Structure formats: structure tokens, C-alpha cells
Image: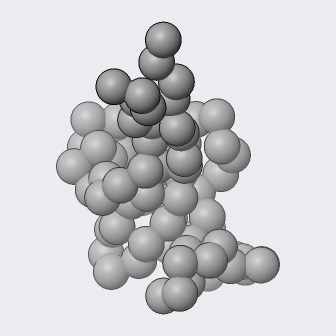
Amino acid sequence: MTGWFCSTPLYEWRGRLFEYGAYYGPPWPITKGGEPYKRVGEKWWQFIRPFLDMPDEEQYKYRVGGGCVPLGR
């Protein structure tokens, strides 16, 4: 039997690190310490809009971590 460990996919685009995945909600910026920001404003949404408009294949090029990995193998 194999279990899975899943975390939010991480992306780095234009110098910003953020979490983003279909099941995890909207893209959310991550601090240098690795914690999600508590709040974001209009500047964040203006920044991230071009990324969201990209096709999935293009977005995937900026993925730097996260996702699901098998356990117990």
C-alpha cells in the first residue's frame, strides 16, 4: 500500500514565490520565511493576472516545488 503526501504547488514568476493549485484556491504569495502572506491587495491581483492568463503548459514552466509524492515505497 502506498500513501501520498500532498502540498500546494509552488511557483516562482517574476521574482515572486507563490502557492497555486486548482484545489487550493487562488494564487497566494509566500514570504521569504516560507509563510503565506496574511493579506494581499489590489497590487498583488494586478501582478498575478498575466500569469493566470497563461496556458497551463506555460505556467508549469515556473513551478518550483510542491504537489504530491508517494510515501512508503
Please identify the residue farthest to the bottom as the structure is shown: 32
Residue in the foreground of this view, choosing between 71 and 26: 71
Left-right relation of 9 to 55: right
The residue located at (33%, 25%) in the rendering is 73
User: What is the x, y in percent for residue 43?
Assistant: 61, 81
Q: Height in image: 59 above or below 16? A: above
Q: Quadrant of residue 46?
A: bottom right
User: What is the x, y in percent for residue 23?
Assistant: 64, 34
Q: Height in image: 60 above or below 40? A: above
Q: Quadrant of residue 27?
A: bottom right
Left-right relation of 10 to 13: right
User: What is the x, y in percent for residue 3?
Assistant: 52, 24
Residue in the foreground of this view, choosing between 71 and 33: 71
Residue 51 seen in this snapshot: no
The residue located at (35%, 55%) in the rendering is 65
The residue located at (22%, 49%) in the rendering is 61
Q: Quadrant of residue 67?
A: top left
The colour style of the image is one colour
Left-right relation of 51 to 61: right
Please identify the residue farthest to the top as the structure is shown: 1
Q: Height in image: 41 above or below 71? A: below
Q: Height in image: 62 above or below 58? A: below
The residue located at (58%, 35%) in the rendering is 22
Residue 32 seen in this snapshot: yes
